[in-house]
Amino acid sequence: MHKHRIILKNFNLENGKISFSKLAELQDRLTALAEGAVLNLIEGRSKPGRGQKPKWLKEVIDFQITGLNPGSTILEIEAPEISQVYQGKQFGIFDEVDAEKLLNESAFGLSSYVYDKAISQPESSGMLDKYLLQKVTDFNKILDNDNSEINLISNGKSKVKSVSIKKKTLEKVSITEQKTRESVKTPIIGTLDVMRHKKEQMEIVTTKDQRIRAFPGNNLNIKNLKKFFGEKVKITGLAHFKTDGNLKYIEILDIQTARGDAESIEELTLPIFEEIDLKRLAKEQEWQGFNEGKFKQSIKDMKVEESPEELLELLKE
């Protein structure tokens, strides 16, 4: 078992005590982040799919509280090692340098690893996506004030020994989350196949041999898709992205046999970065009643020479 410690500083709590309500809030945020981090490592997607959680996943995120110490409120935690609970040695994040070693972490330690990446390397880690970043920023809801701090401490077995969750760093993560592309609905044509190294997962192979990880949406399961394996198909799905803007996986919403000489769509219909950045800027500046469509139309009506994107750059200055 891995040993960890949670230290709550500057909360509205008596030293060495914690209310059931605050404990429940903390448990909810921490296990949600841990679940997303573990699924991301094993399956390559952080958002849980349909149906019940597998037994191994329930066990790996079922942390045990072994003590409550005085001083600042300190919770002693034990958590099992992922590799000791998850017997398969395959994992989903092949482009993460430390992916195989991360199986030796506990889900608690993996949560600290993800948080550290969100702070220090937000646009270069295959571990991060919009869903995980949202689970990180959710901690902001349980901080009692601007000085509240949650310290996650891990023993020597963990790669990241400690992280500090506080409003200032969560604001930084929030900006990364807002900049990360929203999922977008898109058609793709290619051959549906079983993913190499991962028999229980799928991939779409395009005509240019681009391999795209794929998962069934909530209205489908893998049994519905087996008859399409090896076939050229047209898929309508949600494209999910990494923080660096690259495609992470496709969530299959609809599938049918491709007809005629349909060509594979190599470039997804991606949202324009300026539009995402404009929405973020509006949120940060707390513009009341901001409407992106009306804003662009107003620019056209004004017949100004600058484009909406050029005006955006001016607004940033």
Image: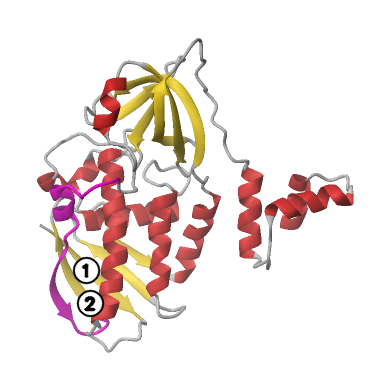
List x then y, in percent, for residue 280. 61, 56
Which secondary structure lies at badge 2? strand
x 35%, y 82%: residue = 11
Pick the front one: 210 or 236: 236
In what quadrant of the picture does the N terminus appear? bottom left
List x then y, in percent, for residue 30. 29, 63
Is residue 317 visible in the rendered structure shown here? Answer: no
Residue projecting furthest to the top:
261
Location of mark 2 (residue): 74
Indicate the quadrant where residue 282 lies. bottom right
Q: Which mark is residue 5?
A: 1
| Label 1: how many Cα within 10 Å (few below 14, some 14–19, many 20+) | many
Instruction: Tell whether label 1 touches label 2 (CB within 8 Å).
Output: yes
Which secondary structure lies at badge 1? strand
x 41%, y 71%: residue = 141
Q: Amino acid at mark 2?
A: Ile
Magenta-tinted stretch: 49-74
Q: Which mark is residue 245?
A: none
Pick the front one: 35 or 216: 216
